[in-house]
Image (tube, helix red, strand yellow):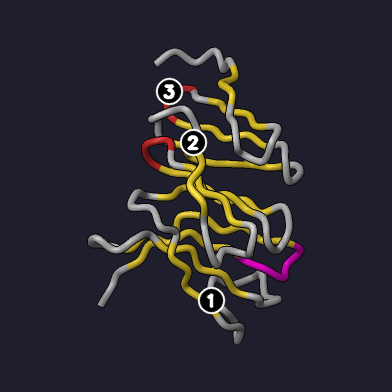
Amino acid sequence: MIMRKILAIFLLLGLLASVVLLTEGCDPYQITTTTTTSTTTTTAAGGSWTSQTSGVYVYLFGVDFVDSNVGWAVGNDGVTIKTTDGGTTWEVQTSGTLNYLNDVQFISSTEGWSVGSGGVILKTTNGGTNWSAQISGVIK
């Protein structure tokens, strides 16, 4: 039996839930999505869940989607991944940090921020192709 722990849930208009799951062992960490309309429970509530491989072997802590196809997930060691097909495939992006990234938030398909340990704040204006460090005022 594979044990999993839910780390983050993102709801898009109550129709798409994206859940970042951790898988114990050496398997890649999983991204799971559903198309249920229920936002009141943590189960699929009759909807179907699809497990999708992230392709990275680190804990993922934050996830954000700007629509049903385009989204990002972030985690340990500065790992940032992006999907443009609803999570079927994920592309690793270079964040420029080795700090743990705890969350990511996008306001459009190009502009977003990621935050992490040690006061790290990263900003992108090109969909995550490049990230620039922002001053947080937090000292390690």
Which label is found at residue 94?
A: 2
The magenta stretch spans which residues? 13-17
Instruction: Check the image and report above or below for 53 versus 123.
Output: below
How many C-alpha atoms fall within 10 Å of the one at disc 1: few (<14), some, or many (≥20)? few
Most foreground residue, 6 or 135: 135
Mark 1: which amino acid? Thr
The reply to whether dot 2 and dot 3 touch (C-beta < 8 Å) is no
Mark 2: which amino acid? Thr
Q: Gap between marks 2 and 3, in whole Å?
A: 18 Å
Which quarter of the rendering shows the N terminus? bottom left
Q: Position of residue 70 (x, y in %)?
A: 67, 55
Q: Mostly what secondary structure, the magenta segment?
A: loop
Residue drawn at (49%, 16%) of the image: 138
Which label is found at residue 118?
A: 3
Instruction: Check the image and report above or below for 123 versus 92.
Output: above
Q: Earlier in the sequence, mark 3 or mark 1?
A: 1
The reply to whether dot 2 and dot 1 touch (C-beta < 8 Å) is no
Mark 3: which amino acid? Gly
